[in-house]
Amino acid sequence: MQHKRKIIGILSLLFFIGIIAYSQYRFSPVGFDIVTRLKMYKELLSGFREPAAPIVRQSIVEEESTTIDVVTKVSPAVVSVVVSTLNYDPFSDLPPEQSQEEGIGTGFIVAANGLIVTNSHVVNSVDGEYSVVLSTGTTYKVSRVHFDEQSDLAILEVDARGLPVVELGDSDSVRVGQKAIAIGNALGRFSNTVTVGVVSGVARGLTAVGGLGESKTYENALQTDAALNPGNSGGPLLNSAGQVIGINVATTRGADNIGFAIPVNTLKPILDSFLKEGRIVRPYIGVVYSIITPEVAKLRDFPQGAYVSRVLPNSPAAKAAIRRSDIIIEVDGKAITVENSLAEAISEKKVGDLLAFTIDRNGTVLDVDVILAEAPDTLLK
């Protein structure tokens, strides 16, 4: 019995010593630090199973994926436009030599049977022979070029079938701030270069610089901060669905991160007429004009509209007795403004349509009817 009591006493002593030791460890700074660290490690380990950071990463991946999908979808239908010219020495008996091909712009395929859209200023050399190069490297010679210099657009024909085509969007529904993706032959050397930005503005009136340094006035351009360089002219400006919303016309003078594109809705009636007639058929009234902005209207006490600076002989406008210095303020009841220019109002009509014009002539408001005629070839090219 005495031996058992000793054993029980020793065990009891060890038990109490253990309790005291644990208490000292548990509530000491060292013990507390270790327990806290274990809990932190446990929380971190559990955090790897349900992290917050990967959610942010996922949104970035989705945005990148949208751009990649657009480029993958559209790039096969984007072409580089190249030109080669003949070097001819009039003082030599040698035959003309073909110069090296040079990239000058971009285009995109709108019909599988070989119809390509670009800017008219890209292909306006009378001495050049043009070709287009697909993203695969396949090259086709341009057999015919159809111009519409008024809109700075051209339709190229190549002998090919089964080509990939773009999808045309609706530029009237474009909103400031939406994504804009440009694909083009940057600097004439880097084909299918992709730049990304947003639509910075709509209905811009400007004088823009084309790929070869020439300038042209545009009335209703889309503005974007997607980088556009010489060689991008004629290429597509795309929305996040991969639809063409504009045709790039490069930059304006003295500007950075400001590029412009012709709204794709300007192209649609031109393309429709070509598909029906085999040539570009454009209605016209035969006036040269400039838009009176709200600022000019207020300063000069003019109504807003299109100020007529010239009336072409034998044109629909001349037959309707429209005169120089008249201000066209409405067409079919719609006001003529920077956002709704005269050219845009007419482009929506067809040859033979009767339009009701409201004009201001030295403060007197008159109503005249104008029958649209087909623009002569000298205006189209």
Image (cartoon, rainbow, N blue to C red):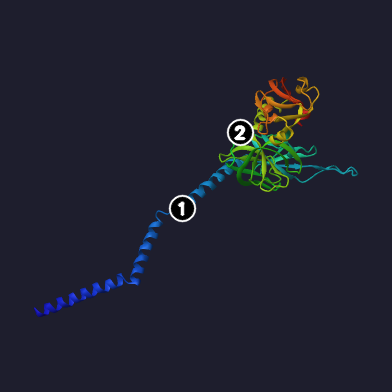
Residue 278 position by quadrant: top right
Say which quadrant the C terminus sits in.
top right
Mark 1 or mark 2, which is nearer to you?
2
Res 136 seen here: no
Residue 275: x percent and y percent?
66, 27
Res 5 seen here: yes
Residue 66 as seen in the image, left or right of residue 251: left
What residue is drawn where x is 75% and y is 40%?
215
Residue 178: x percent and y percent?
57, 41
* Type of amino acid under label 2: Asp
Callout 1: SS: helix
The residue identified by callout 2 is: 172
What residue is drawn where x is 87% and y is 44%?
89
Q: Residues within 10 Å of mark 2 (few under 14, many from 20)?
A: few
The residue identified by callout 1 is: 54
Q: Is 29 rendered above or below residue 154?
A: below
The disc placed on residue 364 is none
Callout 2: SS: helix
The residue closer to the viewer here, 315 or 194, is 315
CA separation, marks 1 and 2? Answer: 38 Å
Q: Is 345 rendered above or below residue 204?
A: above
The residue closer to the viewer here, 133 or 44, is 44
* Type of amino acid under label 1: Pro
* Sequence-first disc among 1 and 2: 1
Q: Is 345 rendered above or below residue 51?
A: above
What residue is drawn where x is 37% and y is 59%?
43
